Image (cartoon, rainbow, N blue to C red):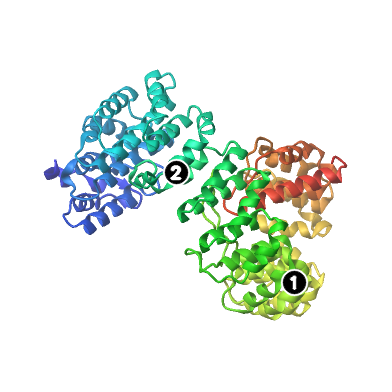
Amino acid sequence: MWDDLEQIAWHRLKHNYGTASDVPGWLRGCASDDAGRAAAALDDFDSAVYHQGGWICPAAPAALPYLVDLAAGRAVHHRQMIVRLIAEFIDEAALVDRRTVDAAWPAAVEREIPRLTVLLDDHEPAVRRAMTWLLSRNGLPQQAVTTAIWRRWHVEDDRVARWDLIAAFGALLERDRDAGDIRTLLHELLDDADVQTGLAAVHALAGTDPDVPLTRAPQLLAAIRDPGIGAWRNSAWFGTSIMDRTGHLLQRDPVVATGFIQALGGGSGRDERNAGLQRAAALLAQWRTPPPALHDFLIERLADDDAEVRFRAAFLLACAPSSTAADTLATLATDTSVCGSRWGATVGDAAVWALARLGDARCVPLIRQQLAGSRLGFAPNGRFYTTPPGSWDGFWLPAVDEALTPLATHAASLVPAVRVGSSRALCRLLGAWGAASAPAVPQLVLLLDRHDRQVAAAEALGGIGPAATDAATDLRRHASIPAAAWAHWRVTANPALALNALTGVTHPHDLHRLGDLGLLAAGEADRLHRLSRSKDDWVRMEAAYAHYRVTADPALAVAVLTELAGPLIDGTCSPVMITALERLAAIGPAAEPAHVIARAVLDSPQRLSYFGGWHVFKEDEHLRSHATTLLSRAGRL
């Protein structure tokens, strides 16, 4: 087979970066005796042919037989990684639109199933473990896979491989809930003498019976604390995530989950305590009103002897503020212990942020020092990512504007310390603080001549308003930029440049600026009406809202914004929905059709958000605030 590798017309096949002519070299590289070269070749192949998924490219079915051959023994190194890559292809093919799967792929997989199932008997346990994950992927013949898994179960002698086989049984059971033999086996294994086997069985049954973990919380904790827990790092299914994923099984019941967190996070091991805080973060991010004991637990962890534990506890008390922690946080605010790789973040940084979220003035002198120095103590930029409910992905501090915007009452004290430099985040902060940021106007004017900072600086000057009158001439000089023309109007009250620059705009940000002009921009009403039918939701929203602001007629805006915010009723959330509800709250009593949305937002026991990390809390708070404003202005609260 390998003698014919170059006979395939690879130049006619495609992968993520173009022609697949480089695939043969990578495949041969994967078989290298040199582990480093083999790893590099596999990484190159993965990056080009699989990349981040999304489709099955034409090069994949042609390469599949060679990948299987490598996994079966031609490769000297990393065979379990090759098995994992094959599994990712199979998994992706079952998830994506069938039209994005190369036509040759299904037949290619079917031809390789006999050779793949043989790998369940490979001499290397790591390969066998990886095969349990591969064979439980969607898109493979259920009966053949089930037979192979059962056969291996009866002879497998590697402890971790048996746990992975149990996980595979759980996946098969989710696809065939009538598989009584599998269900019976898993229930028998719940009380196995090996507590880790029992843990594997709980995980396997959770997909079809989510109440099983809730009835076995003490058993789960015992397994987590058992010395044998370390062996899970070799699992193809769980690896080092076993503690966190075990806690996730209890997330449906905040009381049970809190008890588990307290027991785990109060343990003697550093890993246990950090795992407990990981689960505390996920619980707080999912439920709006967790048991009070959870906050007590976080406050206790502020005194931990491990810096990472203290950092995480302070971070979470910033996400979900507790005034009872204020004094301890104030003490921690000068803790310079560095944690992880978060831009050199310290325990004190998290504590200062928590005090800022509480509105505690004791943070102000420390923040002033940070703003004047070379280290802000916050992230250089916001970090945006999504996570499913009940999950948590990282303790990343907010950007400086995200953290400090609420300190507007202290802005007069803080602004003189600000060194704007090239930071968009600091520009946004100064704009959010409004007139109090006037001392920073000279710094912002200098940024108007920097192409990569013009818009941010102009927006900040516009936020400062008439107090930035010294910037008027420079803003006029840049009036071809809509943000600068808008800022010129905000600073001088002369709308001429803004009307000229904003007439005909279509970008959502510019449409919002156009709306700021109010009745002065009434001539744009018809165009805004047309744009409110755009396929782009952000354009629709801002056009409809601007139409209301330039005409004072709320009918169009209420209809469009209510439609956009509607999915919030079912717990679906996106940034455009959050902003749409904010716009509806600003419209006021005329937005009555949206009252049902606002009521659903306030009644939800779970937080509503789109982005993960601390943004979960910010977005949910914003939604509740907008919903409260909307209903209170109509006398419905």
Observer-side mark, 1 or 2, equals 2
Along the line of sight, the residue nearer the viewer: 502 or 273 = 273
Name the residue that disc number 2 marks: 224
From the viewer's perspective, tell me whether residue 263 is left or right of residue 229.
right
Find residue 4 and report its horizontal and vertical position in percent: 13, 43
Rendered position, 110 above or below 629: above
Amino acid type of the residue tagged 1 in the rendering: Ala
The quarter of the rendered structure image containing the N terminus is top left
Secondary-structure class at tag 1 = helix
Q: Residue furthest left?
A: 3
Residue at 29% x, 44% y is: 59
Along the line of sight, the residue nearer the viewer: 413 or 529 = 413
Q: Tell me if I can see residue 456 in this picture.
A: no
In terms of image quadrants, where is residue 558? top right
Along the line of sight, the residue nearer the viewer: 4 or 134 = 134
The quarter of the rendered structure image containing the C terminus is top right
Secondary-structure class at tag 2 = helix
Name the residue that disc number 1 marks: 411
Rendered position, 56 above or below 414: above
Rendered position, 37 above or below 52: below
From the viewer's perspective, tell me whether residue 496 is left or right of residue 319.
right
Using a 10 Å C-alpha cutoff, classify the residue at mark 1 as few (fewer than 14 neighbours), some (14 to 19) or many (20 or more). many
Find residue 392 and report its horizontal and vertical position in percent: 53, 49
Find residue 294 and report its horizontal and vertical position in percent: 63, 48
From the viewer's perspective, tell me whether residue 570 is left or right of residue 84.
right
Residue at 81% x, 57% y is: 518
In terms of image quadrants, where is residue 418? bottom right
